[in-house]
Amino acid sequence: MIRLTGLTKRYGSFTAVDRIDLEVPQGELFGFLGPNGAGKTTTLRMIAGILRPTAGKVEIAGIDIAKDPVAAKTKLGFIPDRPFIYEKLTGAEFLRFVAGLYDQEGPQIEHRARELLALFDLEEWRDELVESYSHGMRQKLIISSAFIHRPAVIVVDEPHVGLDPKAMRILKDLFREYVRRGHTIMMSTHTLEIAEGMCDRIGIIQGGHMRACGTMDELRANATGGDTGLEQIFLRLTGENAAREMVDVLDA
Amino acid sequence: MSSTPDFVPGVSGPVASGGERADGGLPDPSLLHLLGPKWLTARARSLDDERGRTARWIVLGFFGLIFWAFIFGMLFRLLKYFKGVQEIGPFLSGKLLGLMLIGFFSILLLSNVITALSSFFLAKDLDMLVAGPVDWLKLYGAKLLETMLHSSWMVVLLAIPMFSAYGVVYHGGWYYPLAVLFVFLPFLAIPAVIGSAITLLLVNIFPAQRTRDILSVIAVLTAGGIVLLFRIVRPERLARPEGFRSLVDFVTVLRTPTSPFMPSEWAQRAIMAWLDGRIEPLPFYLLGTTALAAVVLGALLHRALYDKGFSKAQESGGRQARTGVMGRALHRLFSPLGVLRRELILKELRLFFRDTTQWSQLILLAVLVVVYVFNIKYLPLKGEGMTFFLVNIVPFLNLVLAGFVLASIAARFIFPGVSLEGRTLWLLRSSPMPVKELLWAKFWVGTVPLLVLALGIIGVTNYLLQVTAFMMAVSILSITLMTFAMAGLAIGFGTLYPQFETENAAQIPTSFGGLLFMMAAVAVIGGVVILEARPVYTYLSARAYGMKPDLFEMVVGFGLALLLCITATIVPIRIALTRLEAVER
């Protein structure tokens, strides 16, 4: 469903993403991990068609996004990490607007919008302007908007930021059920427990390179030093074990 | 620039545990420390190597100097003339100064009320400052200075050539600038304190979001009122005393707007006495003490009400928006265009009309149009010296002026369109919507109201001018084509020079791209008028002398004007499309 071939992004002399090859098949929830500035967001924004790759190819459901962006994007729903929504639209109007971008309208969309808003406890806020929403409520609205047109693929960057425990649980169930129905989700996150508990496969990126990719069992099997948890594997792979002595830092 | 210093508002000294300073005292950041980030931001901006920055400063500097020279020149001539008038000369100059200062005072008061709302209640740094151990008085001082600076810079820029003209004509001497400074600083401080206090009271009554809406409408209505009043008073009559029945009438008119209790009156008295070679201490004293007393009273009011007001300002004042009859009618109206286009148009309209800071400016626009029509109505087009040509040239000039009005409206409302999408481009770019649809919606949502306005202005003014059918047809066709060209240019330049990070739409037209757009718009208006001048002249001459007009000349002239407008409409939009497709955000 998502295929990346030699995907590269350079900003001047800085290489943010370096020749990434990846295939996320239909019906899989893929977790994308990496330290800050590793290239996760850049990769996801290239998949969403917002950034143009310097080299390489992105295919969504077999369609090359560079060759036929409209067809590829029709299959896609994107949830960015720091989303901005039109402040002067209401929640319901925003969902209607997003559906309109995918040329969808009518009672089915209205029904789906109501269901999604109800799922995230936003039903009472549907006619309130977005400017009065809290950060978490905006995040819920954005997540709802990615599902409004029933895309085959959802690409999501840090979806858990600002969500309450109940919404986190709903999101987890929603993602799992969506994938079970044959759709594909690629998700970046910093919450390793979530990645470990939710994802079918996990990729770890650092410095623009894919350092490891596979199921938890595969990652464990490849890990040296007897690491069993995702946190140890992540820290070992990304070199974060070289953290300073806490005592030295606090005494500084 | 990444020269972020170790600024932690609230803490200026070495910190020990629990926020106490190493020397045992409580943290007490200075006023300068609180203002530090503003200064550093301004410095970083000035060093930023943004595209076209130098060119923008050169162009702005050039136009600024022309503007200064114009104001100085006008006042210089007027004051020279007044100086030559026996007996009442200095009286006239003083009254003129008083009038201008009263104008400044009203503008300052209004602008301070609006700015105070942002700086005291809505600014992004307030969470940090209010949460930090910052003394209330220093917070007040810092925010008052910020408010005063933001609301007064334009008035100061206007005042420089004005005071210079007075100083030069009346030989103010070397210390004159110092005297002006002593007068003008308290003159700026008083409205800043009063404006901030009004805002403080308003925020304590209404939630901040509502207060902003109320203020923007009040501000625009007041500004419109001032413009209307100014036009109705017709100040140009003051320069023509012969138009009055007697000297008594004239002096009565001069006396009308001033008052002994207004700071503008004190400032005028202090300056005029200085220019007369006397130092009158009372007005200086009144200005200084009033400013100080105002700051003290303002600070006390701030201490009593700010905490409650700030807390209230954090309330969003939830706002519902249900689809009413109008919404449903528009939905039906735009449905034939398809789902995507309809939703794009409806989104544009909703965002515009729900943002009071946007639509309230339409009130000011309406006032300006009324003033424009009013001026046309009072043009002395009948009587001696008014030839057939002169009467027909006026509608032609009317076309130019209407074109300028349209260009400035396009700069304010159409030019920022693409910039305002900056933070939502993630949604539009990740959707299958072709970029051209976005530009299409922005073009038509901007062009249709602009065209209605353009045809309205031209139709009414031409009716008042009683122009011939030929001139009416030329005007209407030309203004229609020019409107499309203005909208095309605004979309084009707005996309080529976007300001994606700006939150305030009103600031976008003053960017470098905005300036380029205005220059291009003026060039197109000038081009159309020049191209049409010859065929219009040919036609009018032929009519005046009873001959047949040269058809070839007319076809070439009007044809080229048509070509220019079509090019100015299509080419910028095509460039914008390519540019927007390449934007990576």
Image (cartoon, helix red, strand yellow):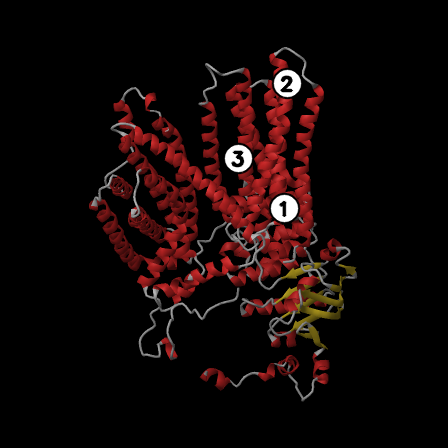
Name the residue carrying label 3: B405
* Mark 3 / mark 2, whichever is N-terminal: 3
Please give the chain letter of the residue carrying mark 2. B
Q: Nearer the viewer, mark 3 or mark 2?
A: 2
Q: Can you give x and y, in whole percent of width and height, for residue B72 in the image?
A: 40, 38
Q: Which residue is mark 2?
A: B539
The answer to whether marks 3 and 2 sit on the same chain is yes
Which residue in the structure is indicated by mark 1? B343
Query: Callout 1, which amino acid?
Result: Glu
Secondary structure beneath label 1: helix
Q: CA distance from mark 1 to mark 3?
A: 30 Å
Q: Residues within 10 Å of mark 1 (few under 14, many from 20)?
A: many
Relative depth, front residue between A43 and B371? B371
What number is the disc on residue B205?
none
* Separation (CA) of disc 1 from disc 2: 48 Å
Residue shown at the point (49%, 47%) measured from the top left = B61
Q: Nearer the viewer, mark 1 or mark 2?
A: 2
Q: Earlier in the sequence, mark 1 or mark 2?
A: 1
Q: Are marks 1 and 2 on the same chain?
A: yes
Q: For the residue carrying disc 3, how many other residues have a C-alpha within 10 Å: few (<14), some (14-19), or many (20+)?
A: some
Q: Nearer the viewer, mark 1 or mark 3?
A: 3
Quick check: B6 left or right of A5?
Answer: left
Q: Nearer the viewer, residue A142 or B565?
A: B565
Residue B557: x and y in percent read 67, 26
Dot 1 falls on which chain? Answer: B
Up the image or down, B426 lies above or below B256; here it is below
Q: Residue at coordinates 70% horizontally, 81% vertically from top-left?
A: A219
Circles 3, 2 touching at the beta carbon (< 8 Å): no
Same-chain check, marks 1 and 3: yes
As drawn, which residue projects farthest toward the right?
A62
